[in-house]
Amino acid sequence: MFARVVSKLLPGRRHLTTTASRPQDFAQLLRLGVFGHRGVGKTTLLTVLYHQAVTGRLPGLRLAAADAATAQHLADKLLALEAGQPLPATLAESDLRFHLYHGEGRLDWLIRDYQGEHVALGRNEPIRDFFRQCDAVWLCIDAQALGDPAESLRSQQEVEQLLEDYLSETATGTIYRPVALVVTKADLLTGPWSKDLAQVRYALAMHCPNHAVFAVSSLAALRGESPGGEGWPPIDSFANMLGWLVAAAQRQDEARLERLASGRSPRSLARAVDVFARRYPQAPAVAQYRQTVREWERRRRRRRLAAAVGLVACLAAGLWTYDALGQQRVQRFEAEHPDAPAEVLAHWRAYQTWHPTRHLFRPEAAQREAEHLRLLTQQAEAQERQARLAQLARGAADPDADPETLWREFLAFRARFPEAGGEVDLRPLRAALQSRLDAVLRRRAEQAYEELLQAERQGTDLERLAARAGWFLRDFPDSPRVADVRRLREAYLRRLDERDIEAAREYSARKPLNFQTRRELYQAYLDKHPTGGAFTVEAKAALQAIATQWDRHDFRLVRDQFLRQPGNMAELVARCRTYLAVHPQGRFVPAATELLRWSEQVTAPREYRVVLVSGEFDRSIARFFSFGPDLSVELEVAGVRYGPSPVVVNRYQPVWDYEFPRPVRWKLGDPVRIRVTDHDWFNRVVLEITSDDGDPWALRLLSGEVASGPHRLIFRSDFALPRLPTIE
């Protein structure tokens, strides 16, 4: 948010002109530009500088990676350098974020690693936009280029191009940002080198008051070596570089604070001082500018207090003047209209509405105003009472006046002025108005009665006649015709009841099986007479009878389907479901539910226990010269054989009481065959009973007694047909 405030205060915050001519530009993140051609050793310099500062080799300074991406980027480069491998050329831009700790302060730096060819002469790449936004710049020149005049000239011209870019956007010819000339690979120098960079050093001396020159060797520092000889930099060059960077940044920030202080913006200065204090907590300027901010805040509070006091005073004076003018106008109107208390009272009410602060400065006037308004109200009511009473008296004396209108006005007068009866005798006026009103009502009642009789003779609809009779009883309750009209209305309603119920009766007699319509007609009668009609009891009894008849009729359809077409299970299931949907509370719901469950069981194969109980056979079944048949029974269900049963020897009435060990598997429509074999001498089938073709319930042969001619067998099984209730 602070950055946005500064951006509004200082347009073009991070342009060259801003950094050069506007030192008050503060941001949480500082930008450091490392300028240099490909192969100059920018990436190696940053990697070794990070290694030196993070391992404690630079006393009082610590450079830490601010995020994981920066730490990973530098870790890969550091491992390669420690393994003695040269770093590959940088191909993509990478933003590196660092925290530079110095004593108790911390500077947050953003450095961009990039491809060195992008800063060559004549190229205009996006990296130059980053350099325009930098707060400090390191100009890196390869020491190997100093031995080659052409390469040295090219390197210095590239640096001069960047400086000219900075100068082209300034109006003073001065570059305020800190600029350092850094000679890399200084361990390869063979002698003094200052004269080889005279072109660049002269430009820096002329245009950059805040500049420095350093010669460093990244690999020598990594190996812990110290180059020697005339012109060599000291071994703590990295410490000097970072120390100069901290000092130069502090000088630049102090200049920005000074510029902010001259701009008289307390809020911006306070926020800038907070940023400066985090960066340089031990700087003397922190206490100085904090005192400046406090002094500005005190002055601003005093100005605001004075403005508030003046505003309150002006507001109070304005309110007093406004209320005084309003009171003056209403008092002048009252003096000009002494005979119009109602209008004067209305002006006083408006004055109270539009001047709610009228008693703010004169609270004692509230009581006088209330008393004055009370008197005005009494005068206005007395004037209105006299005027309305005079109007009523004129109306009572006027033979053409409407008696009903006069009576309503009289009642309104009594309601508005209930105390008027004690001051004026209203009985004569009331009697006169009442007699005229009664005469009018009698004439209207007679006319309405005659119109009712005429409408009846003309055959008007009964509903309209009943309505007109009701209107008569409502409008003329004191008429002598009330009893006659009440009898007529009762006769009309009776005939309406008979007409409504007759429609339901006639339809029920004509369409007895249309239960839904019959019920709707009787229900319509009850809805039309919610308070009770002459035939309400009959209608309710008819609804109950219709429900019972409908319930029996629909279940009779289910029963008939079960008995007449036992194999058509689809139709049986449909009728059961229809019955249950239409009659959820019907009498036969349990039977329909059980039938539906049974039909679902028999339509799928299921196993049943079958017991052969006994039999009874004619003597003709035995062979000649035999003591009696030796009989066994075998079942065949859906082509599957079960048995045979044990052989009962020499019995015409054998008793087996034998349960077939394997349950009989059967579903609806499967045929059943019973085969009886005589084992006397040799096996001979003496009786075969087969279910009828198309018999859907063939398994019932195995439940109870089955006969064929004079022979019979008795079985017992857990198959049983459902028992349906009788329908009266």
Image: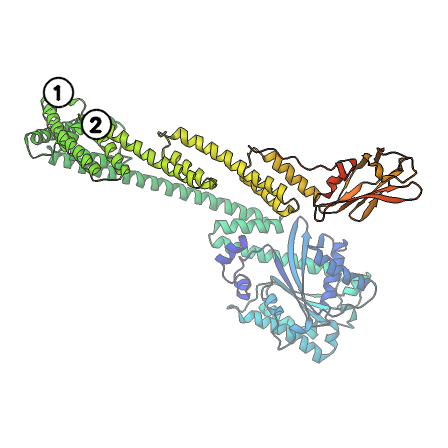
Say how the picture is coloured: rainbow
**Label 1 sits on residue:** 423
Three-letter amino acid code of the residue under disc 2:
Asp
Q: Nearer the viewer, residue 45 or 363?
A: 363
Quadrant of the image for the C terminus?
A: top right
Q: Nearer the viewer, residue 102 or 486?
A: 486
Side (left or right) of 630 relative to 20? right
Q: Which mark is residue 611?
A: none
Circle 1 or circle 2, nearest the eye: 2
Mark 2, other Cα within 10 Å: few <14 / some 14–19 / many ≥20: few
Residue 220 spot, x, y in % from top left: 80, 64
Asked whether disc 1 touches disc 2, contact meaning CB atoms under 8 Å apart, the reply is no
Side (left or right) of 8 relative to 711? left
Q: Nearer the viewer, residue 206 or 263?
A: 263
**Label 2 sits on residue:** 484
Q: Nearer the viewer, residue 255 or 129?
A: 129
Residue 489 spot, x, y in % from top left: 26, 31
Residue 406 spot, x, y in % from top left: 13, 31
- Res. 93 image quadrant: bottom right
Side (left or right) of 325 relative to 510? left
Residue that extends furthest to the right in the rendered view of this protein: 681
Residue 282, relative to residue 177: is it above or below?
above
